[in-house]
Image (cartoon, helix red, strand yellow):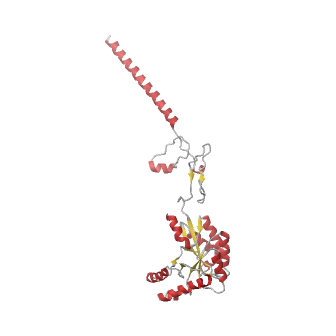
Amino acid sequence: MRKNLCMNKLRASMVILLLILWNLLILSGCSKNNTASISTVNPFPVQEDSASASSHSGTKPVESGVSTPKASEVILPEKAEYSEQQIKAPAGRESVTSAVYKLKNTKLKKKKIAYLTFDDGPSRNNTLKNLDTLKKYGIKATFFVLPQKDVDDVYRRILEEGHAIGNHSYFHDYHQLYNLTDFEFMEDVLMAKNFIKEKFNYTTTLYRFPGGTMGRSKKLLESRNKILESEGYTVYDWDISDGDSDTSEMGSKVEVLVNNVLQGAWGRNSLIVLMHDSPAKTATTEALPKIIDGLVKRGFSFDLLTNKIKNDTDDEG
């Protein structure tokens, strides 16, 4: 009798255990169904590539089972000048009106500006052709001029078409210019300034040292800059040169000049380009359209050096 009683208790325990296991299985199935029914899909989920995900977690990324659009399926704005561009949703999904890129007045892409400058002109053969090219592209440039005879109409055209003129000294004699006393240097600056002012009623505030400031004595430049500042000048060197001042054969090869500028432009958002428009620089005149085309393809717009400080401030704002 005692043996039968024990067997009955064992059977009852097994029944209870089976009931508990059964209930757990039912609850587990409901939980999965509920999770699936309330899951939402981000219309534009961010998807890491497998290599990137593995590097973060150290394990192979787990597939969620939710398809995510490939980068090629999401169309982003192509040009910064677009004020508004809606992202197109992948096939089979509704467009999300809130997913709009507003590029106007934002800094998603820093503006790239090139300042084209020409030294030692003007000349009738090259400056006029360069002005034709600049007019064709709708670009303004800066001309650091010398006092030249019989080209008054060329000076006037530079100014009438909205370009800037800079002071490049009166005599342009390296040996003389950098061995002058401060007083003599000021005379040279004022002679060049007055030449432009008296003939064309234009006062320039830009100055470029012949040969640039690179390699000059710090003490000399300090004294010269004080003189220029007292006359309201801003001094500009350059970031890259087309190399047309090279006296070897390389300085007269069009493709070399173009490549010098375009290679020097890589990685820059702002650059001052040095070229020359004196009578002998015909290769630069021929290279100019190719230089402009190459810079445009790299995302550059163009401006005058007179606006450089303003543009730099806008970029920082």
Q: Position of residue 77 (x, y in %)?
A: 59, 55
Residue 257, visible in the rendered structure? yes
Q: Residue at x 66, y 69 (%)?
A: 137
Closest to the observer, 252 or 124: 124
Q: Position of residue 18 (x, y in %)?
A: 42, 23
Q: Quadrant of the N terminus?
A: top left
Quadrant housing residue 218: bottom left
As displayed, is residue 195 above or below residue 68?
Answer: below
Residue 146, visible in the rendered structure? no
- 269 relative position to 135: left or right: left
Q: Position of residue 7 (x, y in %)?
A: 36, 15
Closest to the observer, 153 or 110: 153
Quadrant housing residue 269: bottom right
Q: Residue furthest top?
A: 1
As displayed, is residue 36 above or below residue 296?
Answer: above
Closest to the observer, 6 or 231: 231
Q: Position of residue 115 (x, y in %)?
A: 57, 72
Q: Residue at x 57, y 85 (%)?
A: 194
As displayed, is residue 96 above or below residue 277?
Answer: above
Closest to the observer, 191 or 93: 191
As displayed, is residue 83 above or below residue 163?
Answer: above
Q: Residue at x 66, y 80 (%)?
A: 154
